[in-house]
Image: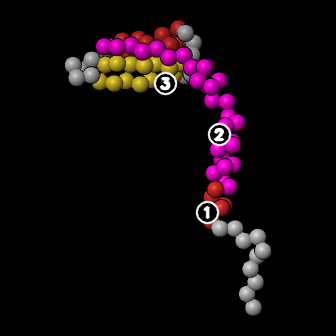
Amino acid sequence: MIAFKDNFESEENKIEKALKNLMKAVEEVDTQSLLDESDSSTHLDTNLSEIIDLLYQSLFVDNNNSVSLFVTKNQDNSLDCTIENL
């Protein structure tokens, strides 16, 4: 004899419920405060020496514990740099 559960739920329903729960959790996270806390500066047409100076300034003079560094190489071999103090 084969018995089936009365409250049989398809995989799609389980996935849909999980997605709704995940979306609800994401909505409850306060991401704006994380964005407000970061302080970033962009420096155009820099070179490696200037980037090192900027990192030194941010970490040791401004006393930040961590930074995020984004560097883009331009066609003329200059560098654009964005430093975000975390």
Task: Look at label 2 and name its amino acid.
Answer: Val
In this rendering, the answer to whether 84 lies above or below 57 is below
Magenta region, residue range: 17-46
The one of 7 and 56 positioned closer to us in this rendering: 7
Q: CA distance from mark 2 to mark 3?
A: 24 Å
Of marks 2 and 3, which one's residue comes earlier in the chain? 2
Tell me the residue that label 3 is attached to.
Answer: 68
Q: Quadrant of the C terminus?
A: top right
Q: Is residue 37 magenta?
A: yes
| Residue farthest toward the right in the current orientation of the protein | 6
Give left or right: position of 24 versus 72.
Answer: right
Of marks 3 and 1, which one's residue comes earlier in the chain? 1
In this rendering, the answer to whether 31 lies above or below 54 is below
Q: CA distance from mark 1 to mark 2?
A: 21 Å
Residue drawn at the location 50% of the way across and 17% of the way down: 40
Tell me the residue that label 2 is attached to.
Answer: 26
The one of 22 and 7 positioned closer to us in this rendering: 7
Task: Look at label 3 and name its amino acid.
Answer: Ser
Q: Are marks 1 and 2 in contact (CB under 8 Å)?
A: no
Disc 3 is placed on an element classified as strand
Q: Is residue 64 magenta?
A: no
Q: Rate crowding at label 1 as few (under 14), some (14 to 19) or many (20 or more) other CA atoms within 10 Å.
A: few
Disc 2 is placed on an element classified as helix
Q: Rate crowding at label 2 as few (under 14), some (14 to 19) or many (20 or more) other CA atoms within 10 Å.
A: few
Q: Position of residue 22 (x, y in %)?
A: 65, 47
Task: Look at label 1 and name its amino acid.
Answer: Glu
Residue drawn at the location 63% of the way across and 65% of the way down: 11
Tell me the residue that label 1 is attached to.
Answer: 12
